[in-house]
Image (spheres, rainbow, N blue to C red):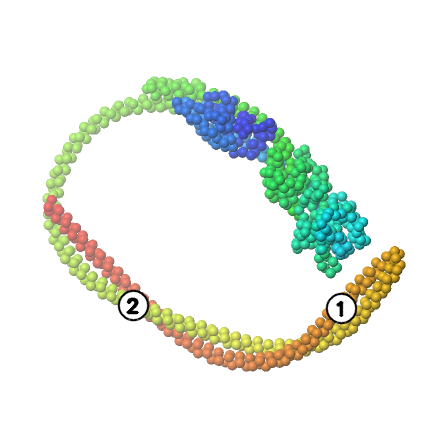
Amino acid sequence: MIITLLLLLAMAQGADDNFPAFTLNFIFDNIKKFFTAVPVLLSLFFFHDKPIWVQMQGLRRMVRARSGDRTACAQRRSRSRPVRRDRIFIFSILLPIFSVGQAKCRCGMSIRLRIILGFLLTTVVLAAGIMINAAFSLRQEAESSYQTAAQRQLRLMAVYVTSFLQTAERNAALLAQDQDVASAGDAFPTYKNVAVKSLFRHADLSWTARRVLEKFTRLDKGYADYAEVYAGYLDGNYASSIDNAEVAPGFDMTKRPWYVARKASPDVYGISESYRSYTGEMVFAVTHKMFDADGNFTGVLGVDVSLAGLSARFKELNFGQTGYFMLIEHTGRILSDPKHPDAAGNIIGQDIKDPGLEALQQAKDGMVAVSVGGIPMLATLRTTEYGWKIAALQAKDEIFAATYRDIRNMGLISAAITILALGLSLLIVRSINRPLDRLVGMAHQVAGGDLSVQLDGAGFYGELAALRQALAEMVQNLKNMLQTAEQKSGEAEEQTRLAKAATEEAEQARQAAERARRDGMLTAAGHLEEVVAVISAAAQQLATRIEQSDTATGASAQRLAEAATAMNEMNATVQEVAKNASDASQVSAEARARAASGADIVGQALSSIDQVQAVSLELKEDMTRLDAHAQSISRIMGVISDIADQTNLLALNAAIEAARAGEAGRGFAVVADEVRKLAEKTMTATKDVGSAIQAIQESADKSVVGMDNALKEVQTATGFASQSGEALQQIVSHVEAAADQVRAIAAASEEQSSASEEINQSIVQVNAIAAQTTEAMHQAAAAVTHLTEQAQRLQELINEMQQS
């Protein structure tokens, strides 16, 4: 059964040559369809009148929307509508309902079919649940094993790639920080004003330039992955480790993209995006800014690094038969793809239109399922700190090969169990169906009116024996009930006759009672009429008095309400005065506290001013000593300047002597030139220090004058602070007097507010009593009105009684 189900689903989806792997993948990816297809197969098997293989072909045609499957039920026809192939689960729901309808139209669902269906469904669902649970567990275990192995390899690859890039950055930094390289721009040619193609020949350059290029060449040849070491200087000068390199007309290094990008970037060094070099291989550039000894920008140094070495390393690290590694740049450019070497250098989404690669490029670190080149694969991703993404890919068929094998074995076992369950259910149904057929025959005879039918107990057991006994008792009860019904029918006729006679006697008694009731009611009506007249007169007088009391009570309540309102307004005014007086008292207290605090602060300010005056005097003495020390340093710098002049003169003489010596004195000339440069730097530094010392002396003189002015201002501030302290003492005295007066006002206002509140409460109580009295009057008036209405109603009844 399970195998048949798998075949049905796979055929509906259109499996190709890789049938087992496709079928199992299909179950994993369409679990809802897998579950809903179980009743489809069962309904087709038990309720259709066609062979199962014909039904499978018809379902396949229906899913593919190539023809309609027609079935008959009570001379009616229905045509299947075309349905999309990826909507098979819709038919999985509708088809069982249609099939059950067919069966019911023919003969109804028998107990045999119900029992077989119950056994089969239980077995199939249980086997399917166990199989699917095991399949998912095996699948997760296979995925976990793959991901663990891939992550381990990715960590190693990430370390290798990071080390590879860091080595290139470190080499570029060491070369760019070399002052011979950074300051050698004037030694190299510039081609921005040259109108013809030129050759960059090392032999044509000066000794200084060749010494720099020797360092370039040594680095280039020391690393097999380095394609070129070059530099672009501020004036467009060009330097390269490649000898006899062709230079285009008007070639300007300062206009190159890598130069412009690095110069504009706040970072000193970095890695450019990869590109294809003039030799056709994929490279990336490591660029670094160059600065002279004074920290001035002089140009950009670059190292072109080939990706061929990385690609070879990636090709060596394949795992399994289909697994391999890919290296993708943050721009989407493929840097290395051992399985598709032609894809290297192409950008995903632009040069290569593959949904699987696009999903791979957009995915975050971790595991993702993709389809590359039409092959379902699992990919594990890891992004390096440089933004390059490493992907480990392996085909799903290889990862889940063992899982597919185990699931296939479980499917065979489940099919065997299903067949055994089907055979067992047939035996059980046969033992139940024979006694049921005898019971059904007995029921048909009883329904036809034959109550003499009987069944012996042979072949009946359990519930079936109880059912046979119940049918026998039912037949006997039917016989007894028929006899009882005949007896009850005779008794009912006799009771009907007696009831008719009693009805005639009751009618005569009713007429006599009606005549007696009419005579008694006339007598009572006369007495009631007199009572009603008295009640009506008294009610009218009482209503008049209640109305007068209600009017007076309403006027009193209105006057009390007006008095309460006025008292509330006066009480609110008194409370507001008391509150304002209390607030004024608090404000006066706060003003006194702040004035006292201000006096303390003024005292502290006087003390601080005295300290400032003392510190200012000490600072004045320190500035005087600083001026003296600066003059001493100035004299020392004069001596250093004289020494530098003498050194420069000696270096010049040494250079002249070296020139006279010719080739033998070349090395000495270089030393003399370096000494001369050192002397010039010393003279420049001496001048800078002298200027700084002179500025210090001028600042010291200005500081001394400023200290004198500050001392005068401090003395003036001391006088002002003393006057402020006296003024604050006077403010404190006035604020204390005002606070006493405000407190007296607040106390009087609070007493007046208490008295007003007591009066207001009394008025409220009186007003409440008046309201209660008014309400009582209203209720009394309503009662009198109701009494009057009842008297009128009684009068009407009396009139009716007299008339009748």
Query: Mark 1 Cα within 10 Å, few/some/many (few <14, many 20+)?
Result: some
Question: Could you tell me which secondary element the residue under label 1 belongs to?
Answer: helix
Q: Which mark is residue 9?
A: none
| Residue at screen point 14% across, 49% down | 796
Instruction: Locate residue 99: give its quadrant.
Output: top left
Please name whichever residue, 741 or 521, is drawn nearer the observer in this view of the structure.
Answer: 741
Compared to residue 81, the image places residue 680 above or below, namely: below
Q: Amino acid at mark 1?
A: Lys
Instruction: Locate residue 552: give its quadrant.
Output: bottom left
Please name whichever residue, 270 or 166, is drawn nearer the observer in this view of the structure.
Answer: 270
Relative side of 280 to 474, left or right: right
Please name whichever residue, 212 or 689, is drawn nearer the observer in this view of the structure.
Answer: 212
Q: Is residue 614 visible?
A: no
Image x and y of residue 135, in percent? 58, 33
Please name whichever residue, 98 or 715, is drawn nearer the observer in this view of the structure.
Answer: 715
Compared to residue 225, the image places residue 640 above or below, namely: below
Q: Is residue 263 visible?
A: yes
Question: Could you tell me which secondary element the residue under label 2 belongs to?
Answer: helix
Image x and y of residue 48, in percent? 46, 23
Which part of the image, by quadrant, shows the C terminus? top left
Q: Amino acid at mark 2?
A: Glu
| Residue at screen point 44% across, 76% down | 743
| Residue with the mark numbered 2 | 562
Instruction: Locate residue 152: give its quadrant.
Output: top right
Compared to residue 637, the image places residue 451 above or below, namely: above
| Residue with the mark numbered 1 | 687
| Residue at screen point 13% across, 47% down | 800
